[in-house]
Image (tube, helix red, strand yellow):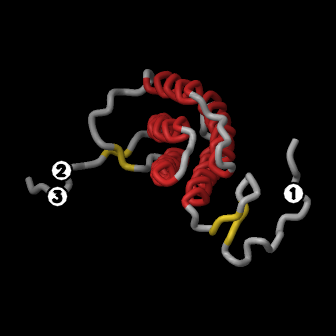
Amino acid sequence: MGHRLSKIYTRTGDQGTTGLGDGSRVEKDDLRVEAYGTTDELNSTLGMVLAEPTVPADLRHWLEEIQHDLFDLGAELCIPGHTVLTAAFVERLEQQIDAMNEHLPPLKEFILPGGNRAASTCHLARTICRRAERRVYTLSKADTINEWGLKYLNRLSDLLFVAARVLARTDNGSEVLWNRERFKSE
């Protein structure tokens, strides 16, 4: 196993740089740091979803697995040239999406983030996932990355949308639908 942190602060970043996993140093706003930092933010937000007691056991299991995947993706982004994610990771997300979606009613209207705290937090995770995807895409234009990380984030945002739909229905709740007619006069 690699190095373990025995001292949390190092003072090496006090001048606006940070160390990558390969030992190189870059500025804290480097595209790579933005990409793995946003991925870490997404992982933390999934932790908030998982802190909700209303998350069904099967979804809880999937989200915990996804947290591990996101940690692997963060490692890929932090260590140039390192790869972990493969097509199998993306296929697993697609299978999970299909399994959740088959029990949901067809989508006929746009959905607003809301319904309950678990669903709302899952929608927040979805939007952070989209931002992570944008950051990783920007990095991919400047440096070589594992293509499966970008595909994974794209599929994950879809999964989080479907998961938010599932969570909105917990405890006899419902989704909040966009009311396109709210300003039309009668």
Disc 1/disc 3 C-alpha distance (Å): 57 Å
Mark 3: secondary structure = loop
Per the image, the residue denoted by label 1 is 5
Per the image, the residue denoted by label 3 is 183
Q: Report the amino acid beneath label 2.
A: Glu
Per the image, the residue denoted by label 2 is 181
Q: Quadrant of the N terminus?
A: top right
How many neighbours does mark 3 have within 10 angstroms: few (below 14), some (14-19), or many (20 or more)? few
How far across and how far down the image is residue 75, in percent? 69, 46
Disc 3/disc 2 C-alpha distance (Å): 6 Å
Left or right relative to 7: residue 46: left
Q: Report the amino acid beneath label 1.
A: Leu
Which residue is rendered at x = 45% and y = 35% of the image?
162
Q: Which mark is residue 137?
A: none
Left or right relative to 103: residue 69: right
Left or right relative to 43: residue 104: left
Q: Report the amino acid beneath label 3.
A: Phe
Mark 1: secondary structure = loop
Tags 1 and 3 touching, CB below 8 Å: no
How many neighbours does mark 2 have within 10 angstroms: few (below 14), some (14-19), or many (20 or more)? few
111 or 72, nearer to the observer: 72
Which residue is rendered at x = 8% and y = 53% of the image?
186
- Which marked residue is nearer to the observer: mark 2 or mark 1? 1
Most extreme residue toward the left is: 186
Tags 3 and 2 touching, CB below 8 Å: yes
